[in-house]
Amino acid sequence: MVWGPQNSVQNKYSECILEMKDQNSGLLLNVFLRCYDDGFAFRYYMPDQNGPEEIIIESEESRFTLCGEYESWWIWADYNTYEKTYIHSGLDSTHHVAAPFTLRKENGTHICIHEAALVDYSSMTLLQAEENDHRFKVNLVPAADGMKVRTQTPFESPWRVFFLSDNAADLANSMLLYNLNEPCKIENTDWIKPVNYIGIWWEMHLGISDWAMTDRHGANTENMKRYIDFAAAHGIDAVLAEGWNKGWENWGEKDAFSFTEAYPDFKLKELAEYANEKGVYIIGHHETGGDIESYERQIDSAFALYQSLGIHHVKTGYAGPSPKGEHKHGQYMVNHYNLVMEKAAEYEISLDVHEPVMFSGLCRTYPNLMCGEGVRGMEWNAWSEGNMPSHTCIMPFTRGMAGPIDYTPGIFDIDLSYHKDERAKWNSLDQGNTAVHATLANQVALMVVLYSPMQMAADLPENYEGHKAFSFIENLPTTWDESIYLDAEIGEYIIVARRSGATWYVAAITNEKKRWISIQTDFLEEGKTYNCRMLMDKPLSHYEDNPEEYMILDMDAEKGDNVELKLAPGGGALLILEEK
Ligand code: NOJ
Ligand code: CA
């Protein structure tokens, strides 16, 4: 692995190929079927043949029948967004769901249905075939003309993937999606660097500063230097700057943004040199507003500019409608996202994609595709009723099955109400009572629970400065030798252990309920004593009325110990175990 939750992955399966011929037309169609220890998958392949030049897929008729009783965790299928609150229900209420779709059978078997290797095809949603018959049909996101896919032979569909496990923890442990994608196509991957980062970002979502060139413009040279200095002093690899480029005042218009011209108060070249001297990477930003025609026209010069300045990471965004009435999750946009991924690789740039099409494991083939949003992220806490603690206890088993998430955790200043002067309410969803629905210990734990090779500590430097808890985020690894989800119940709690070298990080989170958890340290090396540094909730911590109280404790630990911890409602804990 170039980066990942573990340093190598075993790819072991049996494969069967069914070769079929339509008796009337003579058309050839093959089905590949693969069985793994942790699931199975199939894909269609249409070989090159003397047939029609263009193939138009009007509908993919793959159907899956779920026998027995199930609970499921899902969001409504929407062809343009995944930023929704999860629903936990029986199958009778699931009419049309987005992938990944996660289920638990009455006997405890966990299933997640998703797709792998989404290339030149439309993305998959699942539609219950007839009301409550528990048969799900693949429903491809339509193009503007109602057709699903336009292609020619030879072509292959994405894999239809079924993750299977006996428990929730093993669902999240599966690397099946990587195995169903092609090996890395980038020859030299030395420039691909996983990073933890901070950025000029949360302050805009809080309404303290602006993306646009107003008297509160956030991305100015002085402010950026402040973030870079903080990063350099605290073991943070990179700094993101949003609102650095011209065009934010034209939001919603065609050709609104320039991706090569900085606002006059953001001295891009000077900042690139400054960051370089301090050993900090800059993360560039391309918000397209959905106008991909404009973006594609500028993409070469935009990436070339960043490359010439030594900038190797870019966050992209698609917060607005796609052109020509196309849906964000249809083939037209899938091809755009993949084009940007390939272009970025040419210019040695790694990507964090916001408003993406759902990931499908392509980051094995293009490890510069590092992470994406595709979920109701932290930003919703800044300007809406927000995300409840259970949200992050569901995420690794749903959106997380598709690949690394840029959730942007790590908020320390939890009660955001004092930011709510009228000017700060820039979003109509903001009722003036916004808060991060979590304890501070939960926010630190999420940095390890939610794996991403670009992991943001999202709060402002002034909220981290002088805070003991920040020492748990400093120098946090962004790629791991080993990761084991030890124990979990979807929507309830999660305990995960990750190893970097000889050091183990163990993180736990809970939903709205307080609970005792016990961490069995069987993963430690025999005969060694570890110093275990723990950041955890205090007895009276609570995500609603006492979120910022935490404690830090030290103790010795050895293999086989049973560490018992109490997590507050909406709480969490992070343990760092280092050999003594
Ligand atoms: C939505 C993205 O999710 C967010 O991170 C970004 O700040 C805004 N768009 C503006 O680009
Ligand atoms: Ca978003």
Image (tube, helix red, strand yellow):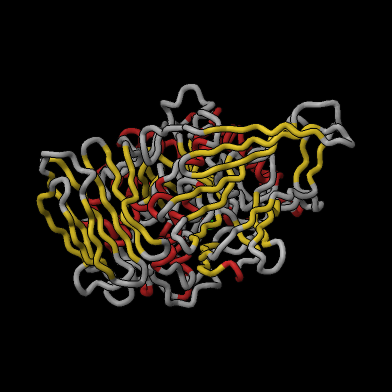
Reply above or below: 299 against 494. Answer: above
Reply above or below: 372 against 179. Answer: below
Question: Looking at the figure, which quarter contains the N terminus?
Answer: top left
- Residue for point 69% across, 69% down: 131
In which quadrant of the rendered view does residue 464 lie? bottom left
- Residue for point 38% across, 32% down: 8
Image x and y of residue 115, in percent:
59, 46
Image x and y of residue 494, in percent:
34, 58
Reply above or below: 474 against 133. Answer: above
Residue 496 vs residue 371, the one in the foreground: 496
User: Along the horizontal axis of the image, is 25 left or right of 356?
Assistant: right
Reply above or below: 368 against 426. Answer: above
User: Along the horizontal axis of the image, is 559 left or right of 317?
Assistant: left
Q: Could you tell me how many numbered marks the image carries?
A: 0
Question: Looking at the figure, which quarter contains the C terminus?
Answer: top left
Image x and y of residue 416, in percent:
37, 70
Residue 271 vs residue 329, the one in the foreground: 329
Q: Residue furthest right?
A: 24
- Residue for point 54% across, 54% down: 374
- Residue for point 55% across, 48% down: 162
Residue 533 vs residue 396, the one in the foreground: 396
Image x and y of residue 348, in percent:
50, 29
